[in-house]
Image: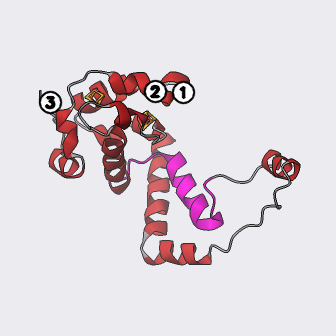
Amino acid sequence: MLLSIKFQARNRFLERGKAVEKCFKCGTCALMCPVTRYGEDYNLRETFMYDIFSSEEPPAKQNLWSCSVCYKCYEVCPQDVNPPKVFKALKEIAFETGRAPLSVVSLVKSVIHTGMAFPMSDASRRMRAQLNLPSFAPKDVDDLGKIAKNTGLEKKLDILKAKRTNEHE
Ligand code: SF4
Ligand code: SF4
């Protein structure tokens, strides 16, 4: 059974996730999703099968950023639908249209400036010492900064950050 998907970015989205049309809402993927099982405020059944298919603006759905991209849902899907690929396409559209969450902007900035998505905590340093791992030395990330600047990514992130901050004030 094919599903009807209605939203503005429909054609653009389908180019990137054609298999989504084959989903017949059996719910098997939701049973296997660890974020649905252990996370808060996330349910693949709602986010993927209902929110996205019924929304006029699926890239605006903030829940799609909660997927941990473990691919368990894809492994069990009888239709080879690949929900994380669908989310990826939607996240790309969300980023391009300024709807990515502030937390994602901060994360990308952190990678550009430190080479890490999350700062190294004192607890992590202690754990490394207990495990006799070498102490952590920050990497040289000058090239990352240059790439971000020359490709316009840094500017795009600043614009996005200002936009999302204003929306939250
Ligand atoms: S398992 Fe596949 S077909 Fe079933 S609801 Fe999930 S994505 Fe759709
Ligand atoms: S890829 Fe995302 S949606 Fe699929 S099982 Fe993993 S966390 Fe859930």
Name the residue tied to disc 3: 3
Q: Secondary structure at mark 3?
A: loop
Amino acid type at image mark 3? Leu
Residues 88 and 72: in front is 72
What secondary structure do most residues of the magenta stretch adopt?
Answer: helix
- Magenta region: which residues? 97-117
Q: Reading the chain from its start, which is encountered first: label 1 or label 3?
A: 3
Q: Position of residue 26 (x, y in %)?
A: 26, 21
Tell me which residue sits at (69%, 70%) in the image.
139
Task: Tell me if residue 10 comes above or below residue 27 in the rendering.
Answer: below
23 within the magenta span: no
Gap between marks 1 and 3 measured at Cα = 28 Å
Q: Which mark is residue 42?
A: 2
Residue 96 sits in quarter: bottom left
The residue shown at (81%, 56%) is 133
Per the image, label 2 sits on a secondary structure element best described as: loop
Which residue is tagged 1?
Answer: 39
Left or right of 105 in this view: 97? left
Identity, as a three-letter code, of the amino acid under mark 2: Tyr
